[in-house]
Amino acid sequence: MVDYAIDIYKNLNGTDTAPEEMLQQRCKSLYDLCQNTQERAKLTASGQWNVTSLVENSSLNISQVTIETFRLLAKYNYECGDYQTARDELQNYISLFKKTPPPAKDDDDEFALESSSSTIFNP
């Protein structure tokens, strides 16, 4: 329904951009999730704070379009001079694509890496 309203607005006003309020309505579910620090921490800890997991979880009501609209909303806020909000939204957006490092296997690997990197090269 929001998409239809955005299309009508664009046609009536002869523009390619939609007002901020319409973009916010389209990505409200993702915006609310980003604001809910407890739920986000739970998803992050379980490894589900990524695009694939959020889209597959139907109870969250988040789609690829929602995520792309969230990025467009950040761009819109930046272009309007609301740099703090744009920064916060982009941090949330980028965090969805961040890969978590694999856990360390044991301490011996760290020692082997340190000793091999401390070797001095003498030509």
Image (cartoon, rainbow, N blue to C red):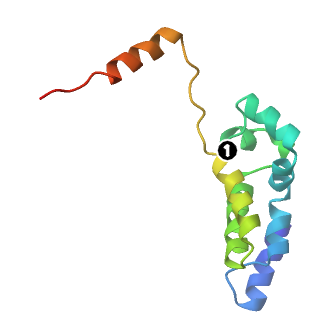
Residue 73 in view, yes or no = no
- Left/right placement of residue 121 relative to residue 32 reads left
Answer above or below: position of 19 versus 23: below
Q: Secondary structure at mark 1?
A: helix
x, y percent for residue 21:
85, 73
Q: Position of residue 86 (x, y in %)?
A: 71, 65
Residue at x 36% of width, y 16% of height? 115
Quarter of image, res 23: bottom right
Q: Nearer the viewer, residue 29 or 45?
A: 45
Where is residue 56 shown, x and y percent of the image? 74, 39
Quarter of the figure with the C terminus: top left
Classify residue 113 as left or right of residue 119: right
Residue 3, picture quadrant: bottom right
Residue found 20% across the figure and 27% down from its top:
121
| Residue drawn 67% across the image and 44% down it | 51
**Of residues 3 and 41, which is closer to you in this image?**
41
Residue closest to the far left:
123
> Is there any visible trace of residue 104 in the rendered image?
yes
| Residue tagged 1 | 51
Q: Quadrant of residue 48?
A: top right
* Amino acid bearing label 1: Val
Give the quarter of the figure containing the N terminus.
bottom right
Q: Is residue 97 left or right of residue 122?
A: right
Seen as rendered, the residue at the extreme bottom is 13
Closer to the camera in the image, 103 or 97:
103
Residue 49, image x, y percentages: 72, 39
Q: Nearer the viewer, residue 33 or 53?
A: 33
Q: Count of labels shown?
A: 1
Asked if 97 appears above or below 90 in the picture, the reply is above
> Which residue is rendered at x = 28% and y = 21% of the image?
119
